[in-house]
Amino acid sequence: MGNKVIILAGGKGKRLGELTDQIPKPLMKIGEYPIIWHIMKIYASYGFKEFILCLGYKADLIKSYFFHYNSRKNDFTIDLANSNIEFHNNVSEDWKVSLIDTGLNTPKGGRVKKIEPYLDSDINMLTYADGLADINIKELLEFHKRHGKTITTTGVPHSSNFGEIVEKEGKVLSFKEKPNITLINGGFMVFNSNFLQRLDNNSKLEEIILRELSKEGEVMVYKHQGNWACMDTFKDYLYLNSLWENNNAFWKNWQ
């Protein structure tokens, strides 16, 4: 049993326009690797290496990427008589990745509910497939364990049109829509197993579930004071790639 990392990777990424007509947003590349790989590397660098990917839009392409991961990274010999493969470089990741098709139009809360059978820990982590941060995952987890509430979100200061987290002394009081300068939910969430009891296959995570739980005093916010960015638009895509190419990728804490 261990803390699983659930990544919501089922959306198309409509704000990226034509870029996601052929591939889903989680496979949009920063450098030579898709953004979902970068997110997974953040967690893996803190020792969390069991992932559950909630798939939807073009799920087959994300499945294919991980199914053929080692053949892309290594030279190999294949015995066509029995399909046995010998990899020569042995360059890989020591990750366990479950790829679960949770439906094309399933809302985010519903996607989490659908992967409940794959969870065996009292505490698990949840994030989006487009957000990057220089966040200390172990500190986030310890913060969650200390307060004992149902779910922790990570709040990041941001000037945008995202919904706002209103909090006092770490307790989330409400969620507001589209202020100018705000504390937003940057992903990197942690939840207790009782959170799953609030969900069904049609649950909307931000619009319904988090708002209900915040009214009950069951949502806390871990305020991340470092760097955060998401790949929401083409401009974001260019920005993140420029950071990577110039060795300024703030989220990269691995060798």
Image (cartoon, rainbow, N blue to C red):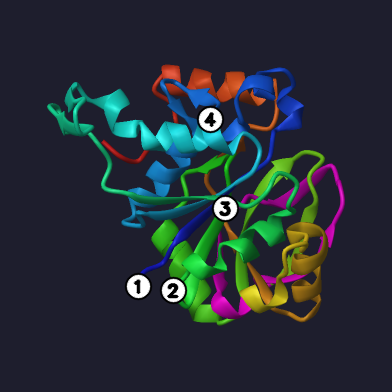
Q: Quadrant of residue 216?
A: bottom right
Badge 3 marks a residue whose secondary structure is: strand
**Measured from the top left, where is residue 1 in percent x and y?**
35, 72
Is 189 contained in the magenta span?
yes
Badge 3 crowding class, 10 Å Cα cut-off, few under 14, some 14 to 19, many 20 or more, is many
**Left or right of 74, for residue 16:** right
Q: Which region shows up in magenta? A: 169-195
Measure how far apart labels 4 and 1 are at the Cα level. Answer: 29 Å
Q: Quadrant of residue 245?
A: top left
Badge 1 marks a residue whose secondary structure is: loop
**Measured from the top left, where is residue 145 in percent x and y?**
48, 77
Q: Which mark is residue 1?
A: 1
Q: Which mark is residue 120?
A: 2
Q: Is residue 251 visible?
A: no
Q: Earlier in the sequence, mark 1 or mark 2?
A: 1
Can you identify the residue that label 4 sits on? 27
**Measured from the top left, where is residue 101 in percent x and y?**
58, 49
For badge 4, the amino acid type reads Leu
Where the C terminus falls, by quadrant? top left
For badge 2, the amino acid type reads Asp
> Which of label 2 and label 3 is nearer to you?
2
Measure how far apart labels 3 and 4 are at the Cα level. Answer: 16 Å
For badge 1, the amino acid type reads Met
**Left or right of 121, for residue 115:** right
99 is higher (above) or lower (below) than 204: above
